[in-house]
Amino acid sequence: MIIVPGPASRELGHEIAKQLQAKTVDTFMKRFPDGEYYIRFETEDFQGQDIIIVQTTAPPQHESLIQLFLMADTAADFGAKSITAVVPYFAYARQDKRFLIGEAFSVKTMVKLLESCGISQIITVNSHNPKVLETFNVPVKDLSAIPLLAEYFKKEGLVENAISLSLGKKALAIASEADSILKGGFDYVPTQRNKVTGKVTLEERKLKVENHDVVIFDDIISSGGTMAKAVKMVKEQGAKKVYAACVHPLLVGNAEERILANGAEAIVGTDCVPSKISVVSVAPIIVEALKERE
């Protein structure tokens, strides 16, 4: 097994290799004046090897995806026995079906492109709709980092008997998963998404959060608008400390400021998307998934 830490996930890739005690092959990358990428492996010795490319596709997602396509196709050209793409944040996965006539089914397109580049398996983390990923030709293994996030709050002593909340009833399984560790009870903040605009609104609902610590869990924080409103609502209902936790901290624009301004103690994320709040590493669950495939 050879681990290739992609340009977007170098630290995570090297940590995975360290825990597996596996060989790594780094990439040299540069950008041409016209914006196109040049990528070169530090070796051509891929013949008959199982190659693991670790490359998140968080924004700038188009750049990260092109890099992933180039690395995978090149590894195939060099005779790799198998190529596994570890894609902690899977770009375009949120468009997981056609809601309106004529829409692109973008996650299907991404998987087809990866397959055409020689990818034989994909490992991702908290994809928007894991069941959709099971319908494609390329095997996709979706891992959950929610227990890692919950363990962080417990280990750091940030909360006591915290209530775990999800954004939306459909995501209640996330809150339940977190509660298996935090054990303070779980519930959801009602949300509704407009199919045309994509705008998410919150519905007022009385929650049993008064005088309790609360952690609101989500798979992705993008603009932060929904999370900020949820934090505000929970605080107004009498919660003591409120934290926002997510697997993929995209934090577009002033998302972090919005959430904190509405009463969150802090935002905690994972290194699926490298950022200053990515304090929880998903390396352990990826390592276990890679061990299982051996």
Image (cartoon, helix red, strand yellow):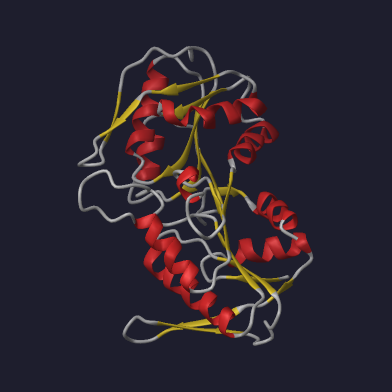
Residue 274 placement (x, y as % from top left): 52, 57
User: Is residue 60 visible to us here?
Assistant: no
Residue 144 placement (x, y as % from top left): 59, 43
Q: Residue at x 54, y 73 (%)?
A: 118
User: Is residue 128 visible to us here?
Assistant: yes
Q: Quadrant of the C terminus?
A: bottom right
Residue 160 against residue 225 in the figure, above or below = above
Residue 205 placement (x, y as % from top left): 36, 15
Q: Residue furthest right?
A: 21
Residue 192 placement (x, y as % from top left): 30, 29
Q: Quadrant of the N terminus?
A: bottom right
Residue 123 against residue 5 in the figure, above or below = above
Q: Toward the viewer: 85 or 30?
A: 85
Q: Residue at x 41, y 43 (%)?
A: 221
Residue 67 against residue 280 in the figure, above or below = below
Q: Residue at x 53, y 29 (%)?
A: 173
Locate residue 207: give its quadrant.
top left
Count how many numbered circles sit on residues in the image.
0
Q: Residue at x 45, y 23 (%)?
A: 188
